[in-house]
Amino acid sequence: MGVGPLNNLTDATIVATMNLSRQQELYITNDLANYDTPGFKAQNLSFQSQLAQALQQGPNAVAQVAGTVQTTAGSVTNNGNSVSMTSEMSDLARSQLLYETAVQAYNEKVTELKIVTEGKAQ
C-alpha cells in the first residue's frame, strides 16, 4: 500500500475485507453453478484468521493477506458432489453482508476525507 491518506490500519483492513469477501463470493458462486456436476468438490476462500493475525503487524501485512482456498472433502450427494446448497447460500449471505459493511465503511472514510480537503460537509 502506498503512502497517502488511506495508508493506515483501518483503511487497509477495509480495502482488504472488500477484496477478499468479493473473491470469496466468486468461489461460492462457482460452487453454486456446479451444484449438479458429478464429482465436483466445493471450494471456499478462508481469510478471516489470516486477516486477524495481520492486524497485529500493521497495514502492509493486512494488504498482503490472500486467504487460503479450502476444498470440501467427501460428498453430500450420490454423484460425489460436495456442494451443499444450504451451506453455500448461508456463506454467500454472510460474505455479501461483510462486503457491504466494508463498502459502507469505505464510503464513510472517503466522505470524511472529502470534508477535510474541501472544508465543508455535504
Image (spheres, rainbow, N blue to C red):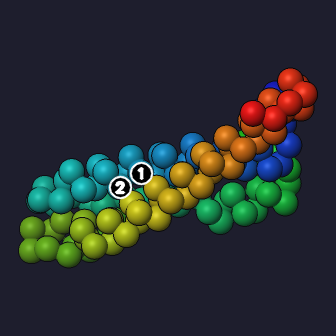
Quadrant in the picture for residue 50: bottom right
In the image, taking residue 107 as reference, residue 9 lies left or right, namely right
Residue 99 versus residue 119 in the image, above or below:
below
Tell me the residue that label 1 is attached to.
Answer: 25
Tell me the residue that label 2 is attached to.
Answer: 28
Q: Are marks 1 and 2 in contact (CB under 8 Å)?
A: yes
Q: Residue 60: horizontal and vertical position, in percent?
A: 81, 42
In the image, taking residue 86 as reference, residue 78 lies left or right, namely left
Q: CA distance from mark 1 to mark 2?
A: 5 Å
Q: What label does residue 49 carry, if any? A: none
In the image, taking residue 24 as reference, residue 73 lies left or right, namely left
Kind of residue indicated by mark 2: Ile
Callout 2: few (<14), some (14-19), or many (20+) C-alpha neighbours within 10 Å?
A: many
Q: Is residue 96 visible?
A: yes
Q: Residue at x 75, y 62 (%)?
A: 53
Q: Residue 109: horizontal and vertical position, in percent?
A: 76, 42
Quarter placement of the C terminus: top right
Kind of residue indicated by mark 1: Glu
Q: Residue 81: horizontal and vertical position, in percent?
A: 18, 65
Q: Residue at x 14, y 74 (%)?
A: 77
Q: Nearer the viewer, residue 51 or 109?
A: 109
